[in-house]
Amino acid sequence: MHLLKKKQPNKLKILNDPIYGFIQIPNSLIFDIIEHPYFQRLRRITQMGFSNLVYPGANHTRFHHALGCIHLMQKAVRVLRFKQVEISNEEENALCIAILLHDIGHGAFSHALEHSIVSGISHEEISLKFMKKLNIEFEGKLTLAIEIFEGKYHRKFLCKLISSQLDIDRLDYLKRDSFYTGVTEGNISSDRLIAMMNVKDDELVIEQKGIYSVEKFLIARRLMYWQVYLHKTGLVAENMLVNVLKRAKELAEKGDTLFASTSLKYFLYNQISKENFTEETLEMFSKLDDYDVLLSIKEWTNHSDKILSSLSKMIVNRKLLRIEIQKDKFEESFIQKKRLKVSKKLEISSEEAKFFVFQQEISNQAYSSEQPIYILSKYGKLTDMAKASDQLNIQALTYPVIKHFICYPK
């Protein structure tokens, strides 16, 4: 009797992306990483948090974004090789893995978790923990990717493709977020920018003829921050989510029983920081996504705690707090007056009123000369973008614009 041979799965997949068309998975190792539960979790984490409360189409995920990045990275490697820049197959593979996993440490609703139930550890540090764990599972095949991701590889231009002011991450998210929000100001030409890339003295540079594409990229980034990422409604919603999670954690610490999934419960009932972020914590983090948080918030609308239920209802029904934005800080007397009003109305203490009345600041710096984008002249000279551009406003973009906002009930 012949034993039937088990059919091997086809790992050389082609995926259809609404922005770039067909994206190729380059090899079976990358296919296996994509198939891993750690990476599949990114399907359940939105790229833009609560931006869909403003732009209804902004429902794309971190999974989408990571696949777009791998496509652009393959393109960048092809362009650089065509220009006689030596990149080995091992380096290309490591670049693809590093860019694929650069966002794997993002928590539910992206940045909200970093500021509420997990403290003192950034998503980049959690990404690195995931990569090191995967490296053990994949028998050391991610070692070079980790070295590049950490910026420790001796060929610095490879590290710049992963993290710089004109990296593959930004080239994808600006184009992708512009597409899904419908905000055309962010629609950059990532193809043109990649086609203009080159390497000089181990520095990732843009050729002189690509200078106008870089100008458009920087201005697009500035506009996307004001119009999308720092949009007032998105700001209110994200801060309210942070406050909901903070309040839930406060109640958990007092011993209240809260409805939550196993993974969310772990973070609510334990003090998690950089120092005690163990393998068990990482495993729990890998099971936590937007769905856990949203389900809990829906359930908390019925909680006996007035603060938790009120904030939860406001998020679920999109009845958000009012927001005012201005150049200068708001007067302390103005904030106290608002808090007093809320504490009387809801019969809560003025300390508890801080969940409903709070001040924050936002900053937008489109370009930093500390990590310059270099323009390569036809004579081989490198110049910082801010000096190479004849656009005066590029120089102006190097200064951060800081604004202050206050939120309070309508």
Image (tube, rainbow, N blue to C red):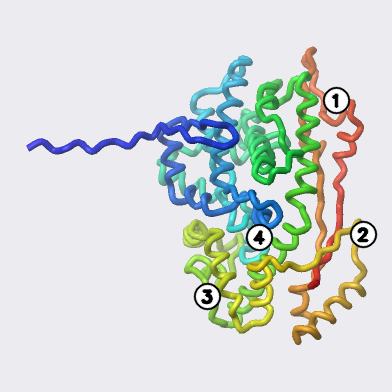
Q: Is residue 167 left or right of residue 287?
A: right
**N-terminal label among 1 and 3:** 3
Mark 1 Cα shell of 10 Å, populated few (<14), some (14-19), many (≥20): some
Which of marks 3 and 4 precedes in the sequence?
Answer: 4
What numbered label is drawn on residue 259?
3
In the rendered image, which residue does mark 4 sit on? 112
- Which residue is labeled 2 in the image? 328
Inter-mark Cα distance, 2 to 1? 33 Å
Whole-angstrom CA distance, mark 4 to mark 3, is 19 Å
What residue lies at 62% left-to-right and 49% top-to-bottom? 47
| Residue shown at 55% from the left, 67% from the top | 267
Q: Are marks 2 and 3 in contact (CB under 8 Å)?
A: no
Residue 164: give x, y in percent of width and height.
70, 37
Mark 1 and mark 2 in contact (Cβ < 8 Å)?
no
Residue type at mark 4? Ala
- For disc 1, the marked residue is 388
Q: Earlier in the sequence, mark 4 or mark 1?
A: 4
